Amino acid sequence: MNDLSGKVALITGASRGIGGKTAELMVKAGAKVIIADVLDDAGKALAESLGGAAAYTHLDVTKEDDWRAAVDLAETKFGGLDILCNNAGVFTGLGIDEATLDDWNKLVAVNMTGVFLGTKLCGDALAARGEQSKHGSAIVNTSSIAGLVGSQLDPLYSMTKGGVALFTKSTALFFSRKGQRVRCNSIHPGVIDTDMGAQTFVSRAQKQGLNDPTKAKEFSAKMHPIGRLGVAEDIANGIVFLASDDAGFMTGAGLVVDGGITAQ
């Protein structure tokens, strides 16, 4: 199950959290992995810990030259590119009335422009390898449950992640129209106990008048019918599945991994 033997993956935001765990699981599943991030020390350390199956590259997802260098590394070091995980994302925790245009532009630059550039600049490499694979190549975009339902506390983040969700569907249709064998799906995490999750607890504590991130974290956990917050591995398992041939009949779909929160 979820065998990635012979596959080459490029994962953004991969030095820690969901991206870091995804890199680990993909290597275990047999893939070669390009760990891409702006957190150089953490990214290099992770790549070193994973041995010869991984390499690190500095990648600011808003920079076209960084993307081109990452694709070149995948092709020259590992022979091509089969999987793109557009995972890098940022969170501001600012309301509509609080955020400046500059705040909004920074959010869009990573959460939306980064996904567009990754898809555009990795497309040819993915399509080339897709011709050699039974079920084609794969793009997995990290969206959020905030991209499926409204968010009282994070409306701007929700807007960007909603954009990722619909772009994923359009991308799937785009590659199909061109006759290129590239599947594209999104994953929608609930509240995950990572560094970004910790940022949301601080923001929610402030907005809910709790003045204690620990209480906000406990409140968030209780919102999930499954009885706990998610952890990075919960989401990474889903990403590995979507990237694998086990998801070979899936494209334009969204996989919700949220402990039941959107079932309410």
Image (cartoon, rainbow, N blue to C red):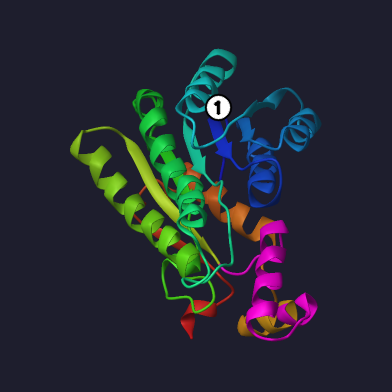
Q: Residue at x 55, y 13 (%)?
A: 76
Q: Main secondary structure of the magenta part?
A: helix
Kindly tell me whether residue 253 is visible in this rendering: yes
- Residue 211 sits inside the magenta stretch: yes
**Disc 1 designates what residue?**
6
In screen coordinates, is 134 left or right of 51?
left
Image x and y of residue 158, in percent:
46, 66
Is 136 left, or right, of 223 in this rendering?
left
**Residue 42 percent across, percent down from the top left:** 77, 37
Q: Secondary structure at mark 1?
A: loop
Q: Residue at x 46, y 41 (%)?
A: 114
Tell me if residue 164 comes above or below residue 230 in the rendering.
Answer: above
Residue 125 placed where, x, y %? 40, 24
For the point 73% across and 22% down, which residue is it? 52
Range shown magenta = 190-216
Query: For this rendering, which residue is in front, 260 or 136?
Result: 260
